[in-house]
Image: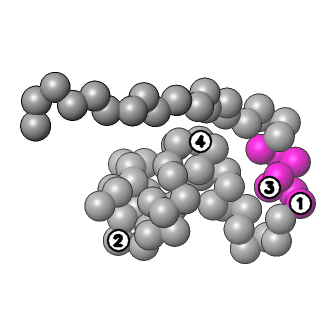
Amino acid sequence: MRQVKLPSVPRKKVLPLTVEQVRTLSEEIPARYKGLVLLGAATGLRPGELFGLQVRHLDLLHGTISVE
């Protein structure tokens, strides 16, 4: 299809949480989710990527996470 104009999609600016906001959030949510909040803030993983992690994705010896 030539000469077709696609509509413009406005991009929203992403504002990461501050360290204090992450700290507050991790203290206010149930303890079982604290690791998810801290890992997400430290790595920038999206919620779906965080929720999909399994033990086999973690390499504690090398300090790496595999996202599939």
Labels 3 and 2: the sequence-earlier one:
3
Which element is circle 1 on?
helix
Residue at image coords 31%, 32%: 6
- Asked whether the residues under the numbered discs 3 and 1 touch, taking CB atoms below 8 Å apart as contact, a structural biologist would say yes
Residue type at numbered disc 3: Ser
Percent across and percent down for residue 40 are: 59, 50
Q: Is residue 38 left or right of residue 30?
A: left
Name the residue carrying label 4.
42
Percent across and percent down for residue 54 are: 42, 73
* First to last magenta residue range: 22-28
The label number, if any, that marks residue 26 in the structure image: 3
Percent across and percent down for residue 12 are: 59, 31
Residue at image coords 83%, 65%: 29
Residue type at numbered disc 4: Ala
- Asked whether the residues under the numbered discs 3 and 4 touch, taking CB atoms below 8 Å apart as contact, a structural biologist would say no
Q: Is residue 15 visible?
A: yes
Which element is circle 2 on?
helix
Q: State yes or no: residue 25 in magenta.
A: yes
Labels 2 and 4: the sequence-earlier one:
4
Residue at image coords 52%, 68%: 51
Residue at image coords 73%, 36%: 17
Name the residue carrying label 1.
28
Name the residue carrying label 2.
56
